Amino acid sequence: MAQREFTGRHAAILFCSAFGVIIAVNITLAVNAVATFPGLEAKNTYVASQEFDTRRTAQQALGWTVTANARGPHLALSIRDSAGHPVQVKTLDATVGRATHVRDDVAPDFRFDGQDYLADLPLGAGNWNVRLKATALNGTEFQQRVVLHILK
């Protein structure tokens, strides 16, 4: 049986094929990364940066601590003041979603039970983010991202 000779043409085909696969994978990953990017956080970053210190100082003056817990089919948000007492807010908006994409994002309807804010939202296992926006009774805006890890 005669052996085939490995020529320069074969080397060029092998070389181009290997780099073709690498380029195709990179393009696929780049397209998927751009397609799943949720978008801009601020419309005008310069204006947002000018107000950042003022908003942060006002928010820190509230002394709030926020935690999130999954309690069976419910999501509980605990907002406590610096003395550890429950805080009732004027407005509360929250978006709950996965850390990696916005496909599962939901805006649950929270109700205050005198201690915590509860929403009917069964969450599966994994890493969740609660992006919270609240307004204190004195009008101070409060924003925080709370990470929630659910093990099952």
Image (tube, grey):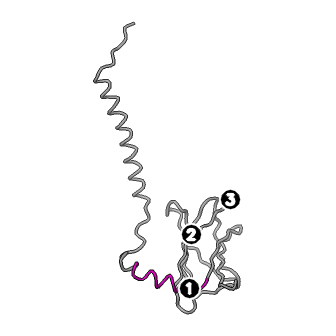
Q: Is residue 58 above or below residue 122?
A: below
Tell me how far mark 2 sits from mark 1, CA to CA. 16 Å
Q: Nearer the viewer, residue 138 or 106?
A: 138
Residue 146's image quarter? bottom right
The answer to whether residue 57 is left or right of residue 43 is right
| Magenta span of residues | 49-63
Distance CA(mark 2)–CA(mark 3): 17 Å
- Residue 119 image point, x, y percent: 64, 75
Instruction: Give the residue at x 33% y 31%.
Output: 15
Q: Residue at x 40, y 48 (%)?
A: 28
Near mark 2 (Cα within 10 A), the count class, few <14, some 14-19 or many ≥20, is many
Q: Quadrant of the N terminus?
A: top left
Q: Regarding mark 1 in the picture, which secondary structure is present there?
A: strand
Pointer 3: what residue? 151
Q: Which residue is mark 1?
A: 91
**Chain-order first, disc 2 or disc 3:** 2
Q: Which marked residue is nearer to the observer: mark 2 or mark 3?
A: 3
Instruction: Classify 71 as above or below 16.
Output: below
- Relative depth, front residue between 125 and 147: 147
Residue at the (68%, 68%) spot, across then down: 70
Per the image, the residue denoted by label 2 is 96
Instruction: Give the overall secondary structure of the magenta segment.
Output: helix
Residue 84 horizontal/vertical position (percent): 70, 83
Residue 144 placement, left or right of 27: right
Q: Secondary structure at mark 3?
A: loop
How far is disc 3 from disc 1 in space, using C-alphas?
30 Å
In this image, 117 relative to 98: left or right?
right
Q: Amino acid at mark 2?
A: Val
